Image: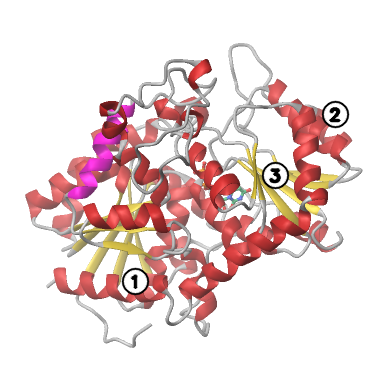
Amino acid sequence: MKAQQTSSAHVLIFPCPAQGHVNSMLNLAQLLALHNLHVTFLNTEHIHNRLTRFSNIESLPARYPTLRFKTIPDGLPEEHPRSGERSVEPLQSVKVHGKPLLRDILVQDRVTCLVVDGFFGKLANDLGEEVGVPVIHFRTIGASCFWTYFCVPNLFESSELPITGEEDMDRTITSIPGMENLLRCRDLPSFCRPTRAKGEPIVPLENIVSETHQTLRPRAVIFNTFDDLEAPALSQIRRRFPTVFTVGPLHQHRESKAPTATNTMRSSNNSIWEEDTSCMAWLDSQPSRSVIYVSFGSVTTMSRESLMEFWYGLVNSKRRFLWVVRSDMIDAGEGKDESIPGELVEGTKERGLMVGWVPQVEVLAHKSVGAFMSHCGWNSTIESVAAGVPMICWPYFADQQVNSRLVSEYWKVGLDMKDVCDRKVVENMVNEVMLIRKDEFLESAEKLAVLARKSVSEGGSSYANLDRLVELIELISQ
Ligand code: UDP
C-alpha cells in the first residue's frame, strides 16, 4: 500500500441490502479509506439498523471511524421477511424508490466516484451519466458465474439453452469460452432452470443477463476474487471488459499490513444477525480438524423435511458439527410450523452445537474446523478458500450452482451434493470429506489458501490491483 496525502476524491459505496453484499463492500470501503480516500457507505435503513443493533453496543461510526455512513429507506415495511422467496424484494424496491434519493446524495454530497453493487448497475449507470459522476461496478459474485451470465445469450444461440426438463440436467455445456465442458445444465445459475426450487425467489433470467451486460458501461469492474482462483473466466472477461480489478479475498488484506488502532480491517461482526460467540469456546474444546461447520448463509430457507435430513445425516455421521440454523430458516409455508424442532437442539448436544449465527470468518479460521457444509454463496466460498477449509456444497439458488461445481470439479476442494437432500448422502459425504479423503482435501484446500494469501500480500495480484484501483479513482475524481 502506498503512502498518500489525503485525497480530494469522495467515493460513495452502495451495496445491495443483503448480508453477503454488505460484508464484502464494507471490506472494500475500509480498504479504500486506508488508502486515504474519503469514503461514504450507503445502506438501507433496515440493514443499517440491524448492523448497529447486532454489533455489540458499538455504533457503526465508532466501529469504523474512517468511514461515513448514510441511509435511505428500502420502501418496505419493517415486518417484511426479506429472506427465502422474498429475499430479492428489498433490492427491487430500492431500484424503484431509491433513484431520486441516490441522485440527491450524489449531487449534494459532491460524490466524485460511485462504487455500486452490480445489481444496481443500470440505475447507477443512468444516474452517473445524468449527474456526471463516474461509476464503477462491484460484482459480489465470482468471476466464473459473472462470465456464465454474460454468455447466456450465446447458450441460446448455440441451442444449449433452454434446459428441457429433469432428464436434460446432466447434459454438458460446451459453449462458455474458457469454461468449456465444466458445467452441466444443473450447474448453470438456478435462473436458467425451467422450474424453480421450492422457496426460491422469482428472478427472470433476462433481467439478470441484461443487468450483467450493463457492466460494459461503467469505468471499471471490481471482483472479490483473485487471479489464480478463476483464471480461465477472468482471461475471457478481460477481453470484453476494458478495466477489471480483482482484489480478493477482500477480508484477508488486513493480514498483510501492520495493524494499528486506526488502520486495522474489521471483517467479522458486520452481522445483521445476533452472533452467538459461545461457539468459539465450544470450538476451543474440540480436537483439531474434527468439526464440520454447517451454514447455508443469510437468505436460504428449507423445508422442515430437508432440515431433518441434514440433521439425521450429521448425527449419523458421528462427526462433531457446528450448525447455524437461523430463526427464519424453515420455510414458513401455509399453516406450517417454522420453529426449530426442540428434539433437534436437544439431540444435537452429544456431538454438536446448534446456534443462530456465528462470526463465520473466525469460525473458518479455527483449528478445530475440518470442513464447511455450505450453500456456496460467493462470500462463504471465498472465505472457505482463504481459510483452507474443504467444502461440502448444497447450493440453493443463483450463482451457488456454479460455485459448487468449481469447488468439486475445478479446485477439487470438496464434494457437491447439488439437488439431493438425503440423510444417507449427507452422512456419506461428511465421512468422505472428514475421514476417508480428509488429507487429500485438506492438502488441495491449503494450496488454494496459500495462493489467496499470496494474492493479498505485497507483490501479489490483488494487492497491486487495489493500488491500481485507488489510482483510477483518484484520476477519474479530478
Ligand atoms: N455469515 C456469518 N455468520 C453466519 C453465516 C454467515 O457471518 O453464521 C456471513 C458469511 O461470513 C458471509 C455472509 O454471511 O460473509 C453470507 O454471504 P454469502 O455470499 O456466503 O451468502 P448469502 O447470505 O448472500 O446467501
Residue 68: give x, y in percent of width and height.
34, 65
Q: Callout 2 environment at 10 Å: few (<14), some (14 to 19), or many (20+)? A: few
Question: Which numbered marker is on residue 465?
Answer: 1
* Alpha-carbon span between mark 3 and mark 1: 33 Å
> On the image, which quarter does residue 269 sit in?
bottom right
Precedes in sequence: disc 3 or disc 1: 3
Please name the residue shown 24% across and 33% down the image. 96
Residue 182: give x, y in percent of width and height.
48, 41
Quadrant in the picture for the N terminus: bottom left
Q: Which residue is mark 2?
A: 343
Q: Amino acid at mark 1?
A: Asn
Q: Which residue is mark 3?
A: 294
Please name the residue shown 59% across and 40% down the image. 375
Q: Secondary structure at mark 2?
A: helix
Query: Residue 140: in sight, yes or no?
Result: no
Tags 2 and 1 touching, CB below 8 Å: no
Q: Amino acid at mark 2?
A: Glu
* Alpha-carbon span between mark 2 and mark 1: 50 Å
**Residue farthest right in this picture:** 350
Quadrant in the picture for the C terminus: bottom left
* Alpha-carbon span between mark 3 and mark 2: 18 Å
Q: Which residues are magenta?
A: 205-216
Which of the pair 208/192 is nearer the observer? 192
Q: Secondary structure at mark 3?
A: strand
